Amino acid sequence: MGNLLGAPVTEKETHVGTTPEGIPYGVSSMQGWRVHMEDAHITQEELYAIESNVGSGAEVNEIPLDGHSLFAVFDGHGGTFAAMYSGRNFCRVLSRQPKFVDYANFSKEWAE
């Protein structure tokens, strides 16, 4: 952190897509003046909650959240590791949170 290049890296990485509901989105990133790309992002078009019973051989139930997507940017000002770790793990951790599972179950019941 703190080291800068003599000139910015202006090459962009761009990804575009459409959610299952037909909502278009796009994300573009550029390294800029930093020595390494420090940012990460998530484009999760479909969300699921993961409900499981604790123990070996536990049953795992994947609960879809229809009409839900997640888009996030993790700025690397806290360091590359923090941004990359968050980008790789956020959805996995969120999907297993008890309150998120409760929300998914409520949404599923309400839709029926």
Image: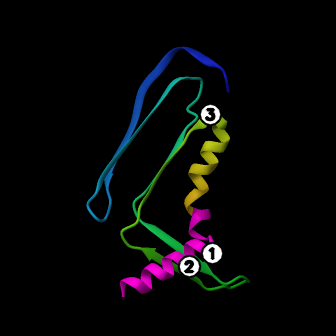
Residue 26 seen by the camera: yes
In this view, the mark in front (3 or 2): 2
Q: In this view, does 103 lie to the left or right of 27?
A: right
Q: Mark 2 highlights which residue?
A: 102
* Circle 1 Cα neighbour tier, 10 Å, few/some/many (<14 / 14–19 / ≥20): few
Secondary structure beneath label 1: helix
Instruction: Return the x and y of residue 14 as percentages of the image width and height.
Output: 37, 39
Please give the label number shown on residue 98: 1
Quadrant in the picture for the N terminus: top right
Most common SS among magenta residues = helix
Which residue is rendered at x = 68% and y = 85% of the image?
A: 57
Q: How far apart are marks 1 and 3 (CA)?
A: 30 Å
Q: How many discs mark residues in the rendered view?
A: 3
Which residue is rendered at x = 45% and y = 67% of the image?
A: 47
Q: How far apart are marks 3 and 2 (CA)?
A: 33 Å
Where residue 95 sits, quadrant-wise, is bottom right
Secondary structure beneath label 3: helix
- Amino acid type indicated by mark 1: Pro
Q: Do the residues labelled 2 and 1 touch (CB within 8 Å)?
A: yes
Give the answer, above or below, for where 92 lies relative to 63: above
Where residue 84 sits, quadrant-wise, is top right
Please give the label number shown on residue 77: 3
- Amino acid type indicated by mark 3: His
Give the answer, above or below, for where 20 lies relative to 13: below
Secondary structure beneath label 2: helix
- Amino acid type indicated by mark 2: Asp
Give the answer, above or below, for where 99 lies relative to 72: below
Q: Which residue lies furthest to the left in this view?
A: 22
Mark nearer the N terminus (1 vs 3): 3
